[in-house]
Image (spheres, rainbow, N blue to C red):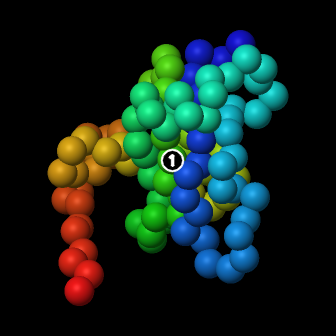
Amino acid sequence: MSKYTWVITQDDVPGDVSSAFAKIGPTGVGNRMSLGQVIQDGEHFRLLDGAGEVKYTGYINGDYAGPEPLEDFGREHGCTDIEYDVGDRWAALDGSTREKIMLSVH
């Protein structure tokens, strides 16, 4: 049994709705946490491509080191980096951070 569960909650890849939305992993593992539990109690992450564009966002919960969603899912879908939500910033595994951009809609 895996000690963590992740779920993709948003797919930013252009085109039709993909099978990535609500994808839960890692694959081939039984006895996962429920989708609701992962989202409610998990840590928010995003997967980025080599150009720094966000392709997927999701949540992970359990005993994990950080790169698991990228290694389990992201790399095979063109992603090269993962960042975690740390309040007003996104933090990469290398320690670098980016400020969150808040858009105002009128």
Could you tell me residue 51's position as x and y percent? 45, 70
Which residue is the extreme one toward the bottom? 106
Residue depicted at x 40% and y 35%? 43
Q: Is residue 83 left or right of residue 28?
A: left
Q: Amino acid at mark 1?
A: Gly
Can residue 41 be spotted in the picture? Answer: yes
Can residue 72 be spotted in the picture? Answer: no
Residue depicted at x 49% and y 17%? 63
Q: Is residue 30 left or right of residue 70?
A: right
Neighbor class of circle 1 (other Cα within 10 Å; few <14, some 14-19, many 20+) is many
In front here: 105 or 3? 105
Q: Please tell me in which quadrant of the rendered image residue 52 appears.
A: bottom left
45 lies above or below 37: below
Q: Secondary structure at mark 1?
A: strand
Looking at the rendered image, the quarter that the C terminus falls into is: bottom left
Which residue is the extreme one toward the right? 28
Q: Please tell me in which quadrant of the rendered image residue 44 appears.
A: top left
Q: Is residue 99 left or right of residue 1?
A: left
Could you tell me residue 85's position as x and y percent? 31, 45
Looking at the rendered image, the quarter that the N terminus falls into is: top right
75 lies above or below 28: below
* Residue receiving disc 1: 58
The total of numbered circles placed on residues is 1
Could you tell me residue 79's position as x and y percent? 56, 57
43 lies above or below 100: above
Residue depicted at x 21% and y 44%? 87
Residue depicted at x 45% and y 52%? 46
4 lies above or below 27: above
